[in-house]
Image (cartoon, rainbow, N blue to C red):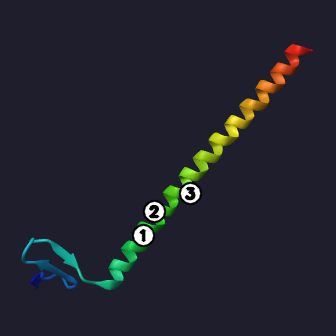
Amino acid sequence: MAKIKVENHPGYVRDTLTGAILNTNLEEIRAAKARKAAKEKEKEDINNLKNEVSDIKLMLNTIIEKLDGSKNNS
């Protein structure tokens, strides 16, 4: 795979086979990976919170049903 520098854009090269422009700046690549990982972690945390809220709602509904059942039996 041959690469040529992109004019006026240091840190970028063009793959002559595919025409794709690639970032060769390792610091920028690491920062992008860190941002992606943080975003994935945030999504995971949000999904965990959604599941926990759903579990709490189910527990509350169970408690309410049991309280209503005990009132009707009295």
Q: Are marks 2 and 1 in contact (CB under 8 Å)?
A: yes
Residue 1 in the figure: left or right of residue 52: left
Quarter holding the C terminus is top right
Using a 10 Å C-alpha cutoff, classify the residue at mark 2 as few (fewer than 14 neighbours), some (14 to 19) or many (20 or more). few
Image point (87%, 18%), residue name: 71
* Image quadrant where residue 23 sits: bottom left
Question: Horizontal and vertical percent for residue 27?
Answer: 35, 84
Q: Are marks 3 and 2 in contact (CB under 8 Å)?
A: no
Instruction: Give the class, few, some or many, for how many residues have Cα within 10 Å of label 1's Cα (few <14, many ≥20).
Output: few
Q: Amino acid at mark 2?
A: Lys
Q: Nearer the viewer, residue 46 or 66?
A: 66
Q: Quadrant of the rendered structure where residue 17 is?
A: bottom left
Q: Which residue is mark 3?
A: 45
At label 3, the amino acid type is: Asp
| In this picture, residue 31 sits left or right of residue 59 | left
- In front: mark 1 or mark 3? 3
- Helix, strand or loop for disc 1: helix
User: Does residue 46 appear to the left or right of 5 in the view shown?
Assistant: right
Image spot of residue 21 (x, y percent): 16, 74
Q: Which residue is mark 1?
A: 35
- Residue found at x 45% / y 68%: 37
Give the structural element (helix, strand or loop) at label 3: helix
Which mark, residue 39? 2
Quarter placement of the N terminus = bottom left
Q: Amino acid at mark 1?
A: Arg
Task: Answer above or below: position of 47 versus 57.
Answer: below
Q: CA distance from mark 2 to mark 1?
A: 6 Å
